[in-house]
Image (cartoon, rainbow, N blue to C red):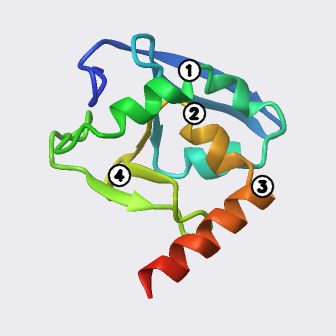
Amino acid sequence: MDCPKCNSEMQELKIEILHGQVIIDKCYSCKGLWFDNGEAEQLKGDWMAEFADSGDSVVGKAYNRVRDIQCPRCSKPMVKLNDSKQSHLEYEACSEHGMFMDAGEFTDYKYETLLDIFRDAVASLKRR
């Protein structure tokens, strides 16, 4: 499978969790992560899963500006979504197959900090 952002080859990354194993795909060029449906939610609660997100978040933010990407499974256009709990966090999703997070986004997704809560509150005030 090729990365939907930089078109480099993605490699499978096996992560052991309490109830088995989750296999995600990681781009070794831009360090983005592909999660099949449900995998990100499974890993969010795992205390060691953030090691998978080893990329530089500054590089990830640069790749976040890439628009109009296709699902690496079905080639349909992916939709940009904001996380429901952390509205500043933006990732791409295919409703049929999964989601793609740029480097640094999964770690942000996994940990909601006080800064995230403050940032989202300020963003909601600006939208009024």
| Badge 1 amino acid | Gly
| N-terminal label among 2 and 4 | 4
Most foreground residue, 6 or 35: 6
Residue drawn 79% across and 60% down? 114
Question: Residue 118, which numbered label?
Answer: none
Which residue, given by chain and number where applicable, does mark 4 sit on? 93
For the residues bearing labels 3 and 4, Cβ distance under 8 angstroms: no
Which residue, given by chain and number where applicable, does mark 1 sit on? 55
Question: Residue 113, which numbered label?
Answer: 3
| Badge 3 amino acid | Thr
Question: What whole-number distance in Å separates the C-alpha atoms at marks 2 and 4?
Answer: 16 Å
Q: Quadrant of the C terminus?
A: bottom left
* Local secondary structure at mark 1: loop
In the image, which is nearer the foreground, mark 2 or mark 4? 2
Question: What whole-number distance in Å separates the C-alpha atoms at marks 3 and 2?
Answer: 14 Å
Most foreground residue, 124 or 37: 124
Above or below: residue 81 compared with residue 74: below
| N-terminal label among 1 and 3 | 1
